[in-house]
Amino acid sequence: MASPNQQYHATFKPHKQFSSNSPFFFKKTSLYTLALVLFLCTFSYLFGVWRHDGGGVSVSKSAATTSTIVSNPCHGPSKTTTAAAKGEKPLDFSARHKADDLDVTSTSEVKTYPSCNVNFSEYTPCEDAKRSLKFNRHKLIYRERHCPEKHEMLKCRIPAPHGYKSPFKWPASRDFAWYNNVPHKHLTVEKAGQNWIRFLGDRFRFPGGGTMFPDGADAYIDDIGRLINLKDGSIRSAIDTGCGVASWGAYLLSRNILTMSFAPRDTHEAQVQFALERGVPALIGIMASKRLPYPSRAFDMAHCSRCLIPWAEFGGQYLIEVDRVLRPGGYWILSGPPINWKKYWKGWERTKDDLNDEQMKIEAVAKSLCWKKKVEKGDIAIWQKPINHLNCKVNRKITQDLPFCPAQDPEKAWYTNMEICLTRLPEVSNKEDVAGGELPKWPERLNVVPPRISGGTLEGITAETFQKDSFLWNRRVSYYKAVNNQLEQAGRYRNILDMNAYLGGFAAALIDDPLWVMNVVPIQAKVNTLGVIYERGLIGTYQDWCEAMSTYPRTYDLIHADSVFSLYEGRCGLENMLLEMDRILRPEGSVIFRDDVDVLVKIKKITDGLNWDGQIVDHEDGPHQREKLLFAIKTYWTAPAVTTSS
């Protein structure tokens, strides 16, 4: 294994291990047979030498170009790969697996991609401010995802701001971020009195405050912990609506609670970008007309601290959506208007009657969902969702309250309209039974067969499938760490994206490292497994990789792409998918591709044009597998310095 201080390259090639078998013995061997074998071996050797020296068909320039390793100009003096340093030739599949059907170019030239204008350094294609103005402002629909048409997609590389640096390592990144990485001071002025963020010369400092917790997120979470148990592992996953710079989620991490934070791209620019720069899970998102991109029964806890969502309006549909994604027995926490309005109504510049009316409406919606108000103390109110709907069904017949939704798929949540009806929980026979199955406490739930699998609700996925998948990914991640020695160094990567997560095995295998994984289940996947990922105590989202992700440029340190490009074959171009990966990958960030070797040859030709340093290596089961791995690094580059005319 390499030293931790060894030069970083796309691959760190492990030593090959050979097993020596017993020699072969032949009881009867004639001189004639030996002579014939010797003649054939000699002829084959001489023929091979003749072809190698030019007598045979030469390797095409295209194949040679495809196998080129792009050097990384941003590290020390040594630019050779580990393999080359050992005197070994880089692995090359081009000559043997020719990509005749390349959809990028049929010539020997590698297509290069220019830099976009510096004005695009924070470009989020599906949340573009100019495009959003074309859409309805009712219920803030214009702030939802609205992606560019195919002909509008940029074919250039998004630049990092001049002076961009690698983020602080966790846990220092929770409290600090480089100014040049997110060069915006608006929040330091807008939220100056709320202890969100401070500007200190070349960096920002995050004191951990919030609008409703100026004394800090830690103290605020301690207040919540006095009302519900945050320590026994029963609460593992949380969702923070309108998260600001995600301090609530950042400080919950030390309590082994993993939070999905989201906020829209609005007048307080860069909220989610700051969160991601801090190494905290977050996505751009808004509650408007579409379901949140998460499965039903995903979160143990939901939170809103003055998030400005009109919970009681539009038939209560936003609280109904929280109910869909909240696990049976889960908690909803609300602080800020209208809670404790008797103390704050003057500061909120609203009348007592107005605030009281808003609270009564929220209470009514919660009651229609069969939620029970657990406590209201000081600035915090907490409701709890029932563990099943047996009593709720009886009450419905009497009150004819909010109806149950008709036959539907509660897991469907990609461009799916919200509904004003109660999402049905799975059936139970006893009032004490947890609908959908009771989950073990964290960390046991990570490796126990999830209820969605043990209950037989996912076609073709069994307990045995789950156990084999867990074993497989533990083995694969060990191999990854042998090839890329940076992956085994704690702190080298913080924000990780798994583009095709399946059962979350890749993330589970990394659970002891100081990092988090955004597990994506593509909407084109054969089986919708995102609910399983959440039942394991992990987080993730749905995504169509023919579109851009709802995140800022330079979000992830490492991207894992297992069979993603085979899944999307014929659906959308490799070029667009790889340009999106380039957009969301940090400078000097890494990518691990797993796919058929022919697909990887195509991918590598494009990544060479993106100026990534990459190398194809063998599958962990050896060279005879068609599936190979491509390890790649996005080389460091930024927008040029802004020059001012004298």
Image (cartoon, rainbow, N blue to C red):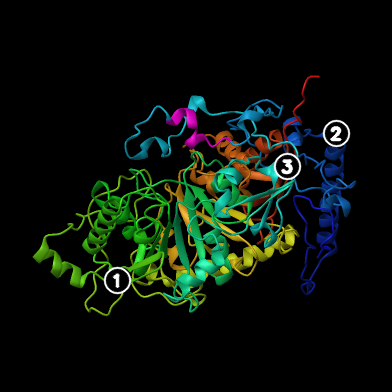
Q: Upstream in the sequence, badge 2 or badge 1? A: 2
Identity, as a three-letter code, of the amino acid under mark 1: Ala
Instruction: Measure how far apart labels 3 and 1 are at the Cα level.
Output: 49 Å
Answer left or right for 254 relative to 534. Answer: right
Q: Is residue 130 a member of the stretch shown in magenta?
A: yes
Residue corresponding to mark 1: 435
Q: Which mark is residue 164?
A: 3
Q: Which mark is residue 54?
A: 2
Crowding around mark 1 (Cα neighbors within 10 Å: few <14, some 14 to 19, many 20+) is many
Identity, as a three-letter code, of the amino acid under mark 2: Gly
Identity, as a three-letter code, of the amino acid under mark 3: Tyr
Q: Secondary structure at mark 1?
A: loop
Q: Upstream in the sequence, badge 3 or badge 2? A: 2
Q: Do the residues bearing badges 3 and 1 touch, measured as CB atoms within 8 Å?
A: no
Q: Secondary structure at mark 3?
A: loop
Which quarter shows the C terminus?
A: top right
Comparing labels 2 and 1, the label whose residue is closer to the camera: 1
Comparing labels 3 and 1, the label whose residue is closer to the camera: 3
Answer left or right for 132 relative to 616. Answer: left
